[in-house]
Image (spheres, grey):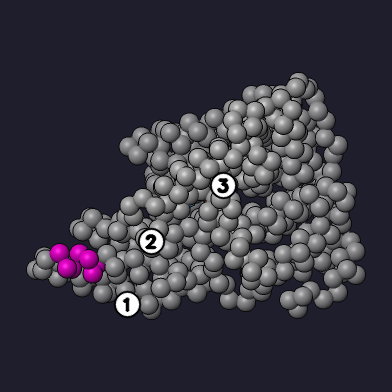
Amino acid sequence: MKRKHDESVDLNELNELRRRAGELVARAGLENGGVKDAYKKLIHEFLDAGGPPDDLIVKIGCQFFGCPVGKSTQGPLQEVHVEGAKVLDFDYLEEFMVQCFLASGCPEKEARVSAGVLIEADKRGIDSHGIGRLKTIYLDRIKNGILKPYAPIDIVKETETTALVDGNMGMGLYVGPFCMELAIAKAKKSGLGFVACRNSTHYGIAGYYTSMACEKGCVGFAGTNARPSIAPTFGVEPCMGTNPLCFGIPSDEAFPFVIDCATSICQRGKIEKYARLGMSTPKGMVIDSNGEERTDTEGILKGMVKGECALTPLGGVGDELGGYKGYSWSVVVELLSIAFQNGDFGPQLTGVDAQGKPAPMSLGHFFLAINVEAICDLEVFKKKTGDFLRYLRNSAKDPNGPGRIWTAGEAENEFRKKRMAAGGVMVPPALLKDMQVLRESLPGLKEKYPKFSFE
Ligand SMILES: NC(=O)c1ccc[n+]([C@@H]2O[C@H](COP(=O)([O-])OP(=O)(O)OC[C@H]3O[C@@H](n4cnc5c(N)ncnc54)[C@H](O)[C@@H]3O)[C@@H](O)[C@H]2O)c1
């Protein structure tokens, strides 16, 4: 059964599945292992139908039968269908983003580079970081005066293999590509290139940058800090950003290995999704200032704004499941984003001033490119990488899982192919509305788009 979209979860169906699961629990004491298998199957159906992993009936199964909690049979990145969504052609959407950046004061070249990073997120299925971010993270911030649509980029200090770059508070979406290009150029000449960047802003998906390196036969490593939201292990204060830590490694397959994710269990966007579904947040993802592991989604969202709720690092609360590992990886990203750059952290990056007004956030990034050919034959390297990834994918499957093993970057590659074949990305009504609002508010947009393709 296909996982349904947020807005189309069928509550009757969920209730029926829950009722049947309850019956099986009740019968379990009387019968043998067949009930356990039936229960597991039903719980997978329940989760795939959009049922919350923290539902009591799932939890009972977990305690009683040892069923995996929250494990879907679907695997990563499922296309979601929202009522009223429209498929927009990628070129059309990208050009719209370019026009918005131009109308907001960004020069042509930088507008195109920036839109290129955002549209790549939409192509890869990372919907939280594409058109969905255009208004709120970039154009609204430009309008509020806390983000410059353009500032010249300075190379402050440089050697054959390193550089310190200053983004002067321009858009991270064009500062980031500049820095990774510089790192790759140095790697191609000298084997390695490391670029630290200061005074930048939100740069989108970290995987864009490591993919740039892979395309040029380099191993890529990139990260950035962000507004503080992760609490340290045994702490409750949001101190670190969701701080993605990203590696890209070229392989002989159609796509490189790209692990591109935050160092928190989830991002704020996921909690917003639980809110839309009317679901509670699974325990362990959020801790409040009293040390409570919070599950009340609406309260969490309010608490996050006030700094009273923090996300937990990969591994979760405390040290039982290795939360200190995710915590320290997040610290690595924060340190590489601030120490070379003499950059801001913590309270200086909340995005609001003492009066609660929007304030600029000066972020740091880092980019490393390693030219594979400086060390070994690129084709041999790629083949060995591919061999190992294939070995992993062909290894024994979890009988409770989707029956398939993925390697990082694979799902995004498949999504890209599917979306390209479908001719574009499904844009939900809320974002179509954002496009209309931008058309009304930005100079020249009404003339360029008297009627959108979806109107
Ligand atoms: N600029 C910022 O401030 C900022 C902050 C945080 C995150 N981000 C971006 O947000 C995006 C999403 O981050 P996220 O933490 O939600 O990512 P996520 O939890 O969706 O994980 C995505 C990564 O995990 C891999 N993956 C997923 N399922 C897998 C499986 N079953 N087997 C193997 N690999 C699997 C994917 O290929 C991908 O590399 C990323 O692009 C990240 O760079 C940006």
Q: In which quarter of the image is the N terminus?
A: bottom left
Image x and y of residue 100, in percent: 82, 58
Q: Can residue 57 be seen by looking at this rendering?
A: no
Q: Magenta span covers which residues?
A: 33-39
Q: Which amino acid does label 3 sit on?
A: Asp
The residue indicated by pointer 2 is: 402
Q: Which of marks 1 and 2 is nearer the N terminus?
A: 1
Relative to 435, is 304 on the left or the right?
Answer: left
Q: In which quarter of the image is the C terminus?
A: bottom right
Image x and y of residue 254, in percent: 59, 53
Image x and y of residue 127, in percent: 61, 59
Select label 1 or label 3 by which is in front.
Answer: 3
Please, is residue 197 above or below residue 270 in the view? Answer: above
Select label 1 or label 2 by which is in front.
Answer: 2
Q: Which residue is located at x 76 percent, y 50 percent? A: 114
Q: Which residue lies furthest to the left in this view?
A: 30
Say what secondary structure mark 3 lies in.
loop
Q: Which amino acid does label 2 sit on?
A: Pro
Mark drawn on residue 252: 3
Closest to the observer, 413 or 450: 413
Relative to 170, is 256 on the left or the right?
Answer: left
Mark drawn on residue 16: 1
Q: Can residue 89 be seen by looking at this rendering?
A: yes
Q: Do the residues labelled 1 and 3 touch (CB within 8 Å)?
A: no
Say what secondary structure mark 1 lies in.
helix
Spatial distance from mark 1 to mark 2, Cα to Cα? 23 Å
